[in-house]
Image: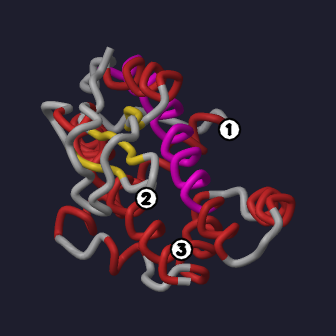
């Protein structure tokens, strides 16, 4: 099982990078809101971690490894951004139903990125403003294209280039999605 190095504060809902999981002790204050005494959960869910583990365990230098890793990573990342978008949409209105309807209509990655950029105080490119963040956004687009091609029977393995893209995504995914999540939590807290 891959280990998550992130905990979620039950009070401010922010994700905290804590490789030693020291903040699992309720006596330690949250570095964002200062609250203590409440338990903190591991982020992502066990189900999500299992799916990522399956993708991460693949030999990224083989065609068969790609045929497994691409759809699992692509799908998992889309669910992760959908979860963040749901919080952002709900922050703009009182209806959970509205959030579900909006997300159903904005169901592709490119549309969800546009929706995020339209609703957020900061677009994804500004949140992920480092060279590594910009590379992640580019690699994520490549992953989405590969996944769609695979789903429609038009995928072919591109060799080491694809392996490098998947490896970069694998290494940065937790950090990137935690950063996006925390930015949205900051926005919701302001409004």
Q: Nearer the viewer, residue 86 or 112?
A: 86
Residue at the far left: name it. 20
In-image side of 101 versus 177 (left or right):
right
Q: Is 19 drawn above or below residue 15 in the view shown?
A: above
Q: Give the image location of residue 21, x and y in percent.
A: 20, 32
Q: Label 1: how many residues lie within 10 Å, few (<14), some (14-19) or many (20+)?
A: few
Ranked by sequence position, the earlier of labels 3 and 2 is 2
In-image side of 189 versus 101 (left or right):
left
Ranked by sequence position, the earlier of labels 3 and 1 is 1
Q: Residue, x 23% and y 50% (percent of image)?
A: 29
Q: Give the image location of residue 165, x and y in percent.
A: 28, 45
In-image side of 20 versus 53 (left or right):
left
Examine the rendering and report whether any part of residue 183 can be seen: yes
Residues shaded magenta: 62-85
Q: Is 108 drawn above or below residue 69 in the view shown?
A: below
User: SS for tag 1?
Assistant: loop
Picture disc at residue 12: 2
Picture disc at residue 152: 1
Picture disc at residue 188: 3
Q: Is residue 135 magenta?
A: no
Q: Label 3: how many residues lie within 10 Å, few (<14), some (14-19) or many (20+)?
A: some
Q: Is residue 68 magenta?
A: yes
Q: Main secondary structure of the magenta part?
A: helix
Q: Quadrant of the N terminus?
A: top left
Q: Nearer the viewer, residue 1 or 169?
A: 1
Q: Give the image location of residue 130, x and y in percent.
A: 18, 72
């Amino acid at each position: 099982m891959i280990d998550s190095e992130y905990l979620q504060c039950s009070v401010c809902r922010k994700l905290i990078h804590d490789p030693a999981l020291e903040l699992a002790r309720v006596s330690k204050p949250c570095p964002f809101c200062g609250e203590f005494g409440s338990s903190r959960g591991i982020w992502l869910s066990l189900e999500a971690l299992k799916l990522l583990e399956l993708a991460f365990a693949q030999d990224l230098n083989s065609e068969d490894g790609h045929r497994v890793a691409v759809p699992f990573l692509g799908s998992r990342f889309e669910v992760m951004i959908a979860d963040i978008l749901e919080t952002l949409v709900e922050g703009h209105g009182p209806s959970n139903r509205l959030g579900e309807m909006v997300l159903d209509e904005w169901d592709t990655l490119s549309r969800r990125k546009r929706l995020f950029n339209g609703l957020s105080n900061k677009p994804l490119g500004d949140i992920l403003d480092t060279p590594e963040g910009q590379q992640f956004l580019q690699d994520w687009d490549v992953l989405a294209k590969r996944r769609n091609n695979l789903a429609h029977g038009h995928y072919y393995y591109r060799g080491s280039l694809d392996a490098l893209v998947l490896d970069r995504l694998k290494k940065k995914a937790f950090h990137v999605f935690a950063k996006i999540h925390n930015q949205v939590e900051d926005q919701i807290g302001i409004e």
